[in-house]
Image (spheres, rainbow, N blue to C red):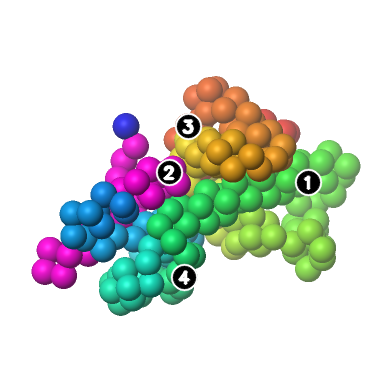
Amino acid sequence: MRQRAILLDCSTARLLDCSTIDVATARQLADQAHKAGYEMVDAPVSSGVAAVNGGMLTFMVGGSESAFARAEPILQAMGKAVIHAGAAGNGQAAKICNNMLLGISMLGTCEAFAMAQKLGLDPQTFYDISSVSSSQCWSMTSYCPVPGVGPTSPADNDYQGGFAAGRMLKDLRLAMEAAETADAPVPMGRRARALYEDFGGAGNGSVDFSGIIRTLR
């Protein structure tokens, strides 16, 4: 069973679903809520644990214009960015596409650092070069998978905390389901899912998803 995080304001008949689920279910729930007299938005979040503690989350919101207008003040109290993604289910669509790209970019970042070390490059030196070059990405400059390099990340805590590999795998599986429904080719996404399935299957489901670099060393 997928965990759900739903906020209900009975005084104004608002439903806000902040969990990450499949797009079809999100749209079905919104339709059921509308028939029951509720305005509902799907509003999954991004940005990680530090953003939760600092009230700096990003909310990607799916729902009607009126539903979004009523939900926006509540979400703004918890986030730095509240973005209307369009109709019901589009918040979930944005979240799974975002996390698919995150999984892919983290794998590329891990591969590059592992290869650089095997070629004799110091990780800090490689970071200093790549972080200001064309390969720069969030997985490198905000969440570097190498301990002691870049801003503090789960890598500096033996890959504990942060975003568990099992959760990344869940989102990648949702992305693959959506891709099949939309007839969207996602070869990199499918490979990322396979790699995280292997990583999780080896007992690393609770390890931060950047810890997959260990399999490349």
Please indicate whether residue 85 sits to the left or right of residue 8 in the image.
right
Q: Which residue is mark 1?
A: 112
Mark 4 or mark 3: whose residue is earlier in sequence:
4
Q: CA distance from mark 4 to mark 2?
A: 20 Å
What crowding class fits label 2: few (fewer than 14 Cα within 10 Å), some (14-19), or many (20 or more)? some
- Residue placed farthest to the right in the image? 119
What crowding class fits label 3: few (fewer than 14 Cα within 10 Å), some (14-19), or many (20 or more)? some
Please indicate whether residue 19 sits to the left or right of residue 83 in the image.
left
Residue 151 on image: x %, y %: 59, 62
Amino acid, disc 4: Ile
Q: Please name which of the two marks, 2 or 1, marks the residue nearer to the observer.
A: 2
Mark 4 or mark 2: whose residue is earlier in sequence:
2
Name which quarter of the figure residue 40 lies in.
Answer: bottom left
Secondary element type, mark 2: helix
- Magenta-colored span: 2-29
Q: Which residue is mark 3?
A: 205
Q: Which residue is mark 2?
A: 24
Amino acid, disc 3: Gly
Q: CA distance from mark 4 to mark 3?
A: 30 Å
Secondary element type, mark 3: loop
Amino acid, disc 2: Ala
The residue under the point 38% across, 50% down is: 27
Q: Please name which of the two marks, 3 or 2, marks the residue nearer to the observer.
A: 2
Q: Is residue 24 magenta?
A: yes
The residue under the point 21% across, 60% down is: 38
Q: Please name which of the two marks, 4 or 1, marks the residue nearer to the observer.
A: 4
Q: Which residue is mark 4?
A: 83
Q: Please name which of the two marks, 4 or 2, marks the residue nearer to the observer.
A: 2
